[in-house]
C-alpha cells in the first residue's frame, strides 16, 4: 500500500482536485462550444462570453498547477525509491510496473499540449474577434480527456508499485522478488525524461519571454 | 501594468477592508499550523531514524521457534564470525521488563563493557562511565523515565527485579541520565550482560539475538545465504529492510493523520467557497466602479485572486512559523505522544530542527492549491457582475 | 467622434418581460461637441450612455467611436477602450468611501501600465482642474456632496479621455453646486473634450456652453 506514503497521498489529492476543477471547466466548455456564435448580439452570446472567462480561468489555474505538480511528481517518485526495494532513483521507480512508461509518455504529451494551449490562448486574447476561440476550447477538451486518462493511470501506477509488506522486517527471508529489471526500459525512460524536461523548460521560457 | 502600482493598490484595499479578511485569515492559520505540525514532526522523526539506523548493525540474526523469536545460543555467534566477510558478530541481550507498580515496560539492555559496542550511543555511554566502580557490584544506568517511575516508589538507591524464575535480583542504581541527553532513551536500563540475563531470565549460554557487521556491501547477500545454510530455524534481518520498515511505519502514521487532515481541508475549502460567495452589494458596487473605469474582467479577477492569495500566503507563513515553534521549541506537547504512540521503539527520538525544501513545497502546494481552487468560482462570479446594475 | 446607427437595445430579450429601451437610435456627435441628452426618467438616457461606454452591449446596430467599431468588442478590448477614451461622471458619484480622494482619482490609472510617479503627477493635475487638491488625503466619506462631485470630476479627467459622459450629474447636488458643475463644462470645452450629459434638470436649458440638446422619449430620439 504505497498509497499511504505522504507524498503520494498529497499528490493524488491535489490531482483529484485539479481534475474536479477541470471537469467543471469541461462541462462549461462543451456548453459554450455548442451554442457559441460570435456574430450574434444576443444576451445568450454575451453570457457565454462571460462564462468563457471562468473556463479560461480554471484552465490557466489547473494547467499552471499541473506544471508545478510535475517536478513534485518526480520528487515523489524519488522519495518512493527509498521505500521501493531495489529502486535507486526515480527512473527505476517509473519502470516498477507496466503503467509507468505509458504514464510518463502521456505526461510529456500533456505538457506539450499545455504549451500549445497557452500560445493559442495568448493569440486569441490579443485579437478582438476571438479568432482561435473554438480551436482553444476543442484543444482543451482533448487535454481534459488526456488528463482524465492520466489521472487513472496515476492511480493504477501508484497502487501497483511493489513494496515490501510493512512487517517485512520480521519475515524470515527477504526474497529476491522485488523490482523488475529496469534496464531494458531504462534507456527509454531516460530519453523520455530528457524530452519531458526539455519541453517543460521550453514552455517556462516561452511564457517568461512572452 | 507595473507590479508595484498594482500591489500598492492591492495592499491599500486589503488594509482598508482588513476586518473582512480576519476570519478567513485565522481559520487558514489554524489549518496550516495543524498540518505543518504533523508534517514537521513526522519529518523530524524520519530524519532521526535515518541517522540512528546508520549506526545500526548490518544484520540481525534471530532464532525462530514456532514463528516467534526465541533466545539464540551464544556460540552461534562464533560460527557466524567465521564466515568470510563478517567483521564483527556480537550476541545481544535486551528485552522488556514489566514494572508492575505502574504497569510500564522498561527496556533492559545488557552490555559487555570490554567488547565492541553495538551502537555509537552505547559506546559514548561507556566512555563517560567509570567502568571499575560500575562493575564492582550489580548496578545499572537508567534513563529519565525509568528514574521517574522508580523515584515514585522511593527506589532511590536500588531496585529488586523479579526475574521469571521467581528469584529476586537486586540491582543498584549507578546513575541516571539527564533529560537533555540523547544517549540513553528514557525507558532504558543499561546493565552488565550477565546481570541483564538474570533479570530477563535468559539462560547462561544464550542471548536475545546476534548482530553482525559486513563492511563490504557486495558480500552481504553471500553472507546472508551462508548464515541461513548453517541453521534452518534462523531469521536474518538486514538493515535495509529495517529502514524500509521504519519508513513505512512512519508513513502509515503520517498517512493516517494526512487522511484526517484531508477531511479538515475539504471542510475548509467549503467554508472558503461559502465565505467568498457571499458578495455584499457594497463589494459589487466597488467592482462595478472599477469596471466602469476601464478595469477588464481579467484585471478584476487578478485583483481578487491576489487579494485572497495575500491573505492565504500570510496565513501560511504565520501558521508555518507557529508550527515550527510548537514542534521544535515546545517539543510538540500532545501531538508527539499521539504521533509517537507508546510503541517501544529501540531508537532514541530527538527532534532535529530539519525542514527540507521538498517538504516546504509539499506544505505549500497542499494548502495553497485548495485555497485558490476554492475562490476561483466566487472570484469569477464577482468579476462578471454587470457594472451598470452594481452601481445602481 | 461618436457615430450611432440603427441602434436598438432590448432588455431581457426573448423573455416574457422583454423591454425595448432604445429604438433605432441614430446619432452623430462631433469631436469637442458638448451635447445634452434630455428626457424624463425611464426614457433610456442611462442605457444609451452605458452603451457608448461599452458597459452594455446593444442588441443590434452600429457604434463607432473615434473610428473604432466597439459594439461587439470582447471585454478585454472594450475595457481597454473605455479606459483610454471614456471619462464617466455618475449621479451617485460612485466613489470608494474608504479610500482617500487621491486614491479614488488614481483608480483608472492603475490598469494603464503607468509608473507610480506619473500616476501621482496626473492625479495632482486632475485635482487642480477640479479644485479638490486641498482635500487629497481626506477619506471620501468625510466629503460634502459638492466635494464628492469634484472628486468624481477629477477621476473622470485623470486618464485624459477624449469623451466625458455625465449621467444626471446634478441630481444629487444643491443649486449652488449644480451651478458650479455647469461652470466646469467650460473647462471641459477648453480641454477639447467631447461631452454628453444625460439629464432632465432644467438648469441645462439654453446654456451657452451647450452646443446641442437632444431629446429622447421612450427610447426614441425625437429632436436633435
Ligand atoms: N437591466 C434592465 N433590465 C430591464 N429593464 C431595464 C434595465 N435597465 C433599464 N431598464 C428599463 O429601461 C428603461 C430605460 O432606463 P434608463 O436607461 O435607466 O432610463 P433613464 O436613465 O432615462 O432614466 C426604463 O424603463 C428601465 O426600467
Ligand atoms: Mg438614468
Image: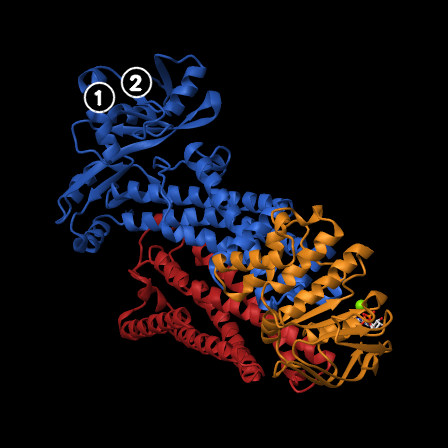
Chain colours: A red, B blue, C orange
Name the residue that disc number 2 marks.
B175
Q: Earlier in the sequence, mark 2 or mark 1?
A: 1
Q: Chain of mark 2?
A: B
Mark 2–mark 1 distance (CA, rounded to whole Å): 9 Å
Q: Position of residue B321 (x, y in %)?
A: 46, 41
- Quadrant containing the C terminus of chain B is bottom right
SS under mark 2: strand
Task: State which quadrant residue B173 falls in.
Answer: top left
- Find out whether the residues at labels 2 and 1 contact each other: C-beta distance under 8 Å: yes
Q: Chain of mark 1?
A: B
Residue, x 51% and y 60% (percent of image)? A14
Is B296 situated left or right of B54 in this image?
right
Q: Nearer the viewer, residue A134 or B42?
A: A134
Residue, x 12% and y 49% (percent of image)? B84
Specify whether residue B123 is in view: yes
Q: Quadrant of ligand 2?
A: bottom right
SS under mark 1: loop
Question: How crowded is the residue under tag 2: few (<14 C-alpha within 10 Å), some, or many (20+)?
Answer: some
Q: Does label 2 point to a residue whose CB lies under 8 Å from ligand 1? A: no
Specify whether residue B238 is in view: no
Amino acid at each position: 500500500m504505497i498509497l499511504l506514503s505522504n507524498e503520494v497521498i498529497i499528490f493524488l489529492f491535489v490531482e483529484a482536485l485539479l481534475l474536479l476543477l477541470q471537469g467543471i471547466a469541461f462541462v462549461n466548455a462543451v456548453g459554450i462550444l455548442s451554442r457559441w456564435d460570435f456574430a450574434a448580439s444576443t444576451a445568450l452570446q454575451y453570457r457565454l462570453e462571460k462564462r468563457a472567462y471562468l473556463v479560461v480561468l480554471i484552465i490557466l489555474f489547473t494547467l499552471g498547477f499541473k506544471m508545478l505538480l510535475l517536478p513534485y511528481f518526480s520528487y515523489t517518485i524519488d522519495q518512493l525509491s527509498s521505500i521501493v526495494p531495489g529502486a535507486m532513483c526515480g527512473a527505476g521507480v517509473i519502470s516498477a510496473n507496466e503503467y509507468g512508461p505509458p504514464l510518463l509518455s502521456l505526461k510529456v504529451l500533456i505538457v506539450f499540449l499545455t504549451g500549445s494551449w497557452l500560445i493559442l490562448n495568448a493569440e486569441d486574447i490579443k485579437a478582438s474577434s476571438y479568432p482561435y476561440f473554438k480551436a482553444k476550447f476543442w484543444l482543451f477538451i482533448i487535454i481534459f480527456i488526456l488528463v482524465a486518462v492520466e489521472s487513472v493511470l496515476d492511480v493504477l501506477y501508484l497502487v501497483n508499485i511493489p513494496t515490501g509488506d510493512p512487517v517485512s522486517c520480521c519475515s524470515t527471508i527477504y526474497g529476491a522478488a522485488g523490482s523488475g529489471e529496469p534496464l531494458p526500459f531504462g534507456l527509454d525512460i531516460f530519453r523520455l525524461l530528457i524530452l519531458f524536461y526539455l519541453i517543460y523548460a521550453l514552455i517556462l521560457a516561452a511564457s517568461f519571454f512572452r | 501594468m507595473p507590479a508595484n502600482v498594482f500591489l500598492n493598490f492591492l495592499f491599500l484595499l486589503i488594509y482598508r477592508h482588513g476586518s473582512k479578511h480576519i476570519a478567513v485569515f485565522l481559520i487558514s492559520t489554524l489549518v496550516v499550523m495543524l498540518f505543518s505540525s504533523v508534517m514537521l514532526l513526522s519529518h523530524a522523526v524520519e530524519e532521526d531514524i535515518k541517522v540512528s539506523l546508520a549506526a545500526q548493525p548490518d544484520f540481525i540474526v534471530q532464532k525462530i521457534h514456532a514463528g516467534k523469536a526465541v533466545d539464540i545460543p551464544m556460540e552461534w555467534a562464533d560460527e557466524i564470525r567465521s564466515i568470510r566477510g563478517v567483521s564483527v558478530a556480537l550476541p545481544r541481550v535486551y528485552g522488556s521488563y514489566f514494572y508492575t507498580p505502574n504497569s510500564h515496560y522498561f527496556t533492559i539492555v545488557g552490555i559487555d563493557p570490554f567488547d565492541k559496542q553495538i551502537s555509537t550511543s552505547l559506546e559514548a555511554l561507556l566512555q563517560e562511565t567509570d567502568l571499575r566502580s560500575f562493575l564492582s557490584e550489580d548496578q545499572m544506568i537508567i534513563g529519565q523515565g525509568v528514574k521517574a517511575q522508580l523515584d515514585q516508589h522511593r527506589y532511590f538507591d536500588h531496585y529488586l527485579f523479579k526475574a521469571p524464575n521467581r528469584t529476586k535480583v537486586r540491582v543498584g542504581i549507578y546513575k541516571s541520565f539527564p533529560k537533555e541527553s540523547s544517549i540513553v532513551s528514557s525507558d532504558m536500563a543499561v546493565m552488565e550482560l550477565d546481570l541483564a540475563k538474570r533479570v530477563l531470565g535468559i539462560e547462561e549460554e544464550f542471548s536475545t539475538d546476534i548482530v553482525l557487521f559486513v563492511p563490504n556491501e557486495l558480500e552481504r547477500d553471500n553472507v546472508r545465504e551462508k548464515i541461513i545454510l548453517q541453521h534452518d530455524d534462523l531469521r536474518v534481518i538486514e538493515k535495509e529492510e529495517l529502514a524500509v520498515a521504519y519508513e513505512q511505519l512512519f508513513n502509515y502514521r503520517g498517512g493516517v493523520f494526512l487522511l484526517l487532515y484531508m477531511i479538515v481541508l475539504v471542510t475548509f475549502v467549503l467554508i472558503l467557497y461559502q465565505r467568498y460567495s457571499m458578495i455584499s452589494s457594497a463589494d459589487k458596487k466597488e467592482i462595478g466602479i472599477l469596471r466602469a473605469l476601464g478595469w477588464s474582467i481579467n484585471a478584476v479577477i487578478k485583483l481578487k485572486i491576489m487579494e485572497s492569495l495575500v491573505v492565504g500566503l500570510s496565513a501560511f507563513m504565520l501558521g508555518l512559523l507557529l508550527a515550527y515553534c510548537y514542534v521544535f521549541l515546545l517539543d510538540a506537547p500532545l501531538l508527539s505522544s499521539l504521533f509517537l504512540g507508546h510503541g517501544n521503539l529501540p531508537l532514541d527520538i530527538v527532534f532535529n530542527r530539519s525542514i527540507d525544501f521538498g517538504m516546504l513545497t509539499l506544505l505549500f502546494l497542499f494548502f495553497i492549491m485548495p485555497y485558490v481552487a476554492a475562490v476561483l468560482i466566487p472570484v469569477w462570479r464577482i468579476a462578471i457582475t454587470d457594472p451598470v446594475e452594481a452601481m445602481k | 467622434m461618436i457615430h450611432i446607427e440603427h441602434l436598438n437595445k432590448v432588455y431581457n430579450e426573448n423573455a416574457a418581460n422583454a423591454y425595448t429601451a432604445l429604438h433605432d437610435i441614430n446619432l452623430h456627435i462631433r469631436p469637442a461637441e458638448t451635447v445634452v441628452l434630455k428626457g424624463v426618467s425611464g426614457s433610456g438616457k442611462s442605457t444609451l450612455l452605458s452603451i457608448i461606454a461599452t458597459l452594455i452591449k446593444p442588441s443590434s446596430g452600429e457604434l463607432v467611436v473615434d473610428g473604432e467599431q466597439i459594439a461587439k468588442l470582447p471585454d478585454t478590448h472594450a475595457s481597454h477602450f473605455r479606459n483610454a477614451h471614456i471619462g464617466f461622471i455618475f449621479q451617485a458619484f460612485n466613489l470608494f468611501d474608504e479610500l482617500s480622494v487621491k486614491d479614488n482619482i488614481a483608480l483608472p490609472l492603475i490598469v494603464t501600465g503607468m509608473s507610480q510617479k506619473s500616476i501621482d503627477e496626473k492625479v495632482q493635475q486632475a485635482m487642480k482642474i477640479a479644485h479638490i487638491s486641498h482635500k487629497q488625503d481626506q477619506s471620501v466619506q468625510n466629503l460634502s456632496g459638492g466635494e464628492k462631485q469634484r472628486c468624481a470630476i477629477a477621476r473622470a479627467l485623470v486618464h485624459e479621455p477624449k469623451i466625458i459622459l455625465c449621467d444626471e450629474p446634478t441630481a444629487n447636488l444643491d443649486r449652488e453646486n449644480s451651478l458650479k458643475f455647469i461652470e466646469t463644462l467650460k473647462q471641459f470645452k477648453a480641454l477639447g473634450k467631447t461631452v454628453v450629459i444625460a439629464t432632465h434638470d432644467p438648469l441645462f436649458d439654453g446654456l451657452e456652453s451647450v452646443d446641442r440638446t437632444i431629446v429622447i422619449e421612450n427610447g426614441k430620439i425625437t429632436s436633435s
